[in-house]
């Protein structure tokens, strides 16, 4: 049996309209097992679907177009984690509103109506691509906003979404590390079809920052289970891991992070953003993976 713990907003001095909806709406949900029995934390940072009314009103795109950046239903794919003894953290806000797989202050100066503070990172490759902490475009390349934003708007989102999500994630990792002496974070994502891999697309991509964020043995164990289930798996191509993987993956400190990207074509209709007939089979496969992980002796992750 699992229990869901909803955390309220941090930084309550921020405007109430930062996240719309009822007062109990929180930027994330944690589903905890009755007792944590494996040294693994699962996280889904991009599956949130609580779109603020202000975003829908001010965006130049239709709601369906805004959802192209979502990792839709990924939290559902890994929903069995608590039943097998691991917590699952999932953002409730959408990626296009605030991307927690970025540094907190990766902002595109062209999006704003005035100068940004000098400490803001305005020159990262992600900012240049329009996909900073506050995205300028959606995954299909279309511009999100009709107008330029005030820096205060971005700051409010980061304070109300990015910061509490990472506080919660860091706390789960710390709790797990304290209990077991080490921790493995599985950062869960989905991927669209990649133009460079049309001929032989992978079903899943495991990203460990080219071996720097996770013990190779852990990556190999996950890979072997997925390959054994019949999936085409690649490592670090084209996704080696984002901010979360690189920031939290510190093998020398017995904290490991592995990003998993799952092809959306396996389980959903990408055009209509709807669950597809393959979802049930994929959930069964991922349940098998999680069950295998629950039975694995992860002591080799301890430094």
Image: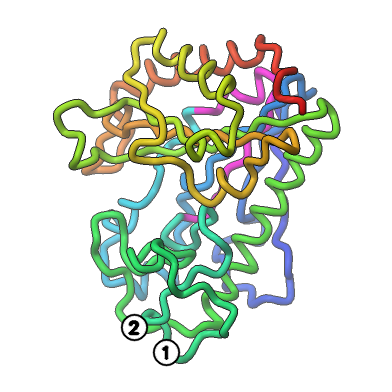
Q: Looking at this view, is 271 or 107 the one in front?
A: 107
Residue 261 at what x, y percent from top left?
41, 34
Around disc 2, counting alpha carbons within 10 Å, would you say few (fewer than 14), some (14 to 19), or many (20 or more)?
Answer: few
Q: In the rendered view, would you say 22 is above or below 288? A: below
Q: Quadrant of residue 124?
A: bottom left
Find out whether the residues at labels 2 and 1 contact each other: C-beta distance under 8 Å.
yes
Q: Which residues are magenta?
A: 78-94
Residue 54 at what x, y percent from top left?
44, 72
The numbered dot on residue 113 is: 1
The numbered dot on residue 125 is: none
Gap between marks 2 and 1, in whole Å?
9 Å
Residue 290 at what x, y percent from top left?
57, 18
Q: State the residue position of label 2.
A: 147
For residue 85: magenta? yes
SS at mark 2 in the image = loop
> Quick one: label 2 or label 1, which is nearer the N terminus?
1
Q: Residue at the far bottom: name it.
A: 114
């Amino acid at each position: 049996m699992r229990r869901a713990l909803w955390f309220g907003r941090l930084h309550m001095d921020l405007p109430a309209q930062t996240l719309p909806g009822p007062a109990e709406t929180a930027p994330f949900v944690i589903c905890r097992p009755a007792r944590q029995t494996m040294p693994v934390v699962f996280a889904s940072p991009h599956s949130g679907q609580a779109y603020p009314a202000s975003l829908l009103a001010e965006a130049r795109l239709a709601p369906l177009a805004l959802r192209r950046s979502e990792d839709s239903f990924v939290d559902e794919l890994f929903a069995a984690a608590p039943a097998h003894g691991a917590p699952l953290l999932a953002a409730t806000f959408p990626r296009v509103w605030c991307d927690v797989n970025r540094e907190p202050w990766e902002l595109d100066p062209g999006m704003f109506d005035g100068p940004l503070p000098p400490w803001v990172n305005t020159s990262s490759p992600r900012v240049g691509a329009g996909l900073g902490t506050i995205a300028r475009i959606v995954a299909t390349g279309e511009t999100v906003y009709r107008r330029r934003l005030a820096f205060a708007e971005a700051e409010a989102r980061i304070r109300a979404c990015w910061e509490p999500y990472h506080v919660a994630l860091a706390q789960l990792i710390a709790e797990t590390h304290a209990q077991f002496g080490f921790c493995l974070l599985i950062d869960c994502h989905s991927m669209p079809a990649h133009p460079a891999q049309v001929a032989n697309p992978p079903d899943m991509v495991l990203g460990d920052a080219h071996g720097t964020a996770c013990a190779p043995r852990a990556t190999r164990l996950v890979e072997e289970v997925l390959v054994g289930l019949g999936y085409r798996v690649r490592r670090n191509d084209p996704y080696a891991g984002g901010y979360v993987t690189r920031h939290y993956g510190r093998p020398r400190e017995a904290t490991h992070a592995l990003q998993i990207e799952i092809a959306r074509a396996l389980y959903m209709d990408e055009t209509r953003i709807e669950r597809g007939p393959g979802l049930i089979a994929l959930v069964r496969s991922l349940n098998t993976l999680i069950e295998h992980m629950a039975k694995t002796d992860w002591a080799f992750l301890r430094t």
